[in-house]
Amino acid sequence: MFLQTPTQFRSVKKTMATDKDAGQEETGEREKQRVTDHFGFEYKEEEQEFHYLPSVRPEVIWTREEKWRTMLDQWDDHMDRKAKKIKERCRKGIPSSVRSKAWVYLCGAHRLKEQQPNRFEELIRLPDDHSTYITDIEKDLARTFPHHELFIDKASQGQQDLRKVLKAFAHHNVDIGYCQAMAPVAATLLLVMPAEDAFWCLVQICERYLPNYYSSGLLGVQVDARVLDCLIMKYLPDVGRHLKLHKVDALLFCVEWFMSIFSRTLPWSCVLRVWDIFFFEGVKVLFRVALGVLKLILGSKKQRLKYEGFYTINQRFRNLTVKETHEDILFPLMFDFSVSARELEKEYIAQDKLLRAEESEKHRQKFKQTH
């Protein structure tokens, strides 16, 4: 089972959650009401504004659906001759009814699936060898979107499919294996598409879109955090000086934001929009979103005076409000930052070289101390 469109949860549902562990300490009423939004996420009444629906008229959605269906039926031609049009339509938001197929086509996962039609089934049938990654995957299943109906308990279809996708990837790419940050990425894909398609999209994300993000040492995200620090100083110099004054570098929040592709940070409606663009434009979208959020949080002098000190700023990054993350506010702002792929590549090469030199020096000094 997978969530192809949000219409499955269009009406707010109320169910009863019962504490099944008789030995568990009583913490209040044994039964409590759960409210789920149209996407299937549980939420408290005071969090309701965070679970909004995008304000797009039905007739606009229907028109976009027809355009996307036509485009997907003639995909190669559109990619070759009308890439600009695809970019525009991704930025407007992909209709939920075609999002599954669109993501698969945008990232090229359909090609991999066609080339290796039985690969996924072969991988999930491989025996568990009780290696560390299998143990880690099992631990993380219940931690991934625990407040979503699809992943709510061990027997749920979501947890079963998540296990398959993560296990398959670990067998497929033994150099990367498994990293905890992959779980919310895979889960996001499973909320949109079937397990096999989710697996191939995960392969593309880990190997093509975000190389070295999930491998040992997390080199890719470390370098990108340094790149983000440079971009902050370039596009938001006052914010950059404020963060530097309080010894806050981008790695502090970049790991959470970038490695999960904002799936654990933004409202779900906004997450889907970010991913729509990400699959076409690539990693530069993550930098634009980050710059947009930073401007909304610390862009004014009044905000910077309010949030001073390492701990205070760190907590602020962990508690974003809907005012800073609503797509109608964030998206127009993030596109004001004209971060280009060429600019990112140039800065990435420079920061990668610098980081590797620093790591080499650390190893050299450590060797001197022990010999």
Image (cartoon, grey):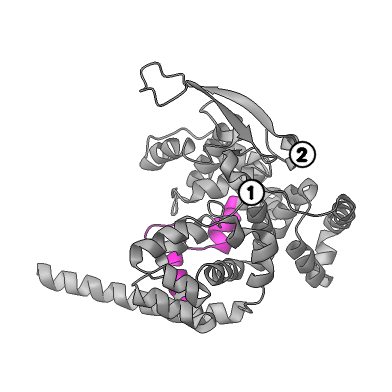
**CA neighbours of label 2 inside 10 A, class few (<14), some (14 to 19), many (20+):** few
Instruction: Inspect this view and state whether residue 223 appears.
Output: no
Range of magenta residues: 202-227
Secondary structure at numbered mark 2: helix
Instruction: Inspect this view and state whether residue 231 appears.
Output: yes
User: Which residue in the protein does label 2 denote?
Assistant: 7
Of residues 238 and 230, which is closer to you in this image? 238
| Picture layout, residue 210 above or below residue 195 | below
- Disc on res. 234: none
- Disc on res. 49: 1
For the N terminus, the image quarter is top right
Between tags 1 and 2, which lies in front? 1
Left or right of residue 22: residue 326: right
Q: Is 211 within the magenta?
A: yes
Image position, residue 26 (x, y; %)? 38, 22
What's the amino acid at mark 1? Glu
Q: Is 35 within the magenta?
A: no
Image position, residue 250 (x, y; %)? 43, 69
Query: In terms of image quadrants, where is residue 102?
Result: bottom right
For the C terminus, the image quarter is bottom left
Q: What residue appears at the point 11 percent right and 67 percent down from the top-left corner?
A: 370
Image position, residue 269 (x, y; %)? 67, 51
> CA–CA distance between discs 1 and 2?
19 Å
Of residues 126 and 274, which is closer to you in this image? 274
Query: In terms of image quadrants, where is residue 253?
Result: bottom left
Report the magenta stretch's main SS: helix
Left or right of residue 22: residue 77: right
Q: What residue appears at the point 50 percent right and 59 percent down from the top-left corner?
A: 257
Secondary structure at numbered mark 1: helix
Image position, residue 353 (x, y; %)? 40, 79
What's the amino acid at mark 2? Thr
